Amino acid sequence: DEGAAAAGKGDRKEARKEYHKRIERKRRDRMRNLYDELRSLVNPDEPADKNSVLAGAVSLIQELRDENIKLQSRVHIKEKRSKNKGGETNLQIKVFKGKDKEEGKKG
């Protein structure tokens, strides 16, 4: 029966559309949640559009990369000084949480 076959194709087409809508809605929700999370990490006090959030994230990542390079350089310099004094490496690494809290020393 041609009418039943046509109705079956129409039902499948509608089901595919609904499935696609549901998947697309999930994708948009996930993107929205990720932007909200990123905004809260970058600048939680100011509401911002997506471009501002991304620009702030790029800036923060660059600052953190620069800070990491500086810290690695300082560790390397301390390691050199320690080798020069006694011949052996006597490096102490301080682990910090946040900005100023010393958690412990490793030797």
Image: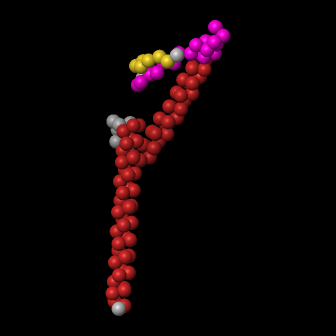
Does residue 93 appear in this view?
Answer: yes
Q: Quadrant of residue 36?
A: top left
Question: For the point 34% across and 89% down, which residue is it?
Answer: 3
Colour scheme used in the picture?
A: secondary structure
Q: Quadrant of residue 40?
A: top left
Q: Quadrant of residue 103?
A: top left
Question: For the point 50% across and 36% down, which residue is it?
Answer: 61
**Relative image position of residue 20 (x, y in whole percent):** 39, 66
Seen from this angle, which residue lies furthest top? 85
Q: Is residue 101 above or below residue 69?
A: above
Segment colored magenta: 78-98
**Relative image position of residue 46 (x, y in whole percent):** 35, 38
Q: Nearer the viewer, residue 55 or 66?
A: 66
Q: Is residue 104 above or below residue 68?
A: above
Question: For the point 34% across and 68% down, which residue is it?
Answer: 18
Q: Is residue 49 above or below residue 10?
A: above
**Relative image position of residue 22 (x, y in whole percent):** 35, 63
**Relative image position of residue 97 (x, y in whole percent):** 41, 24
Is 45 on the left-hand or right-hand side of 88?
A: left
Q: Nearer the viewer, residue 9 or 45?
A: 9
Does residue 49 appear in this view?
Answer: no
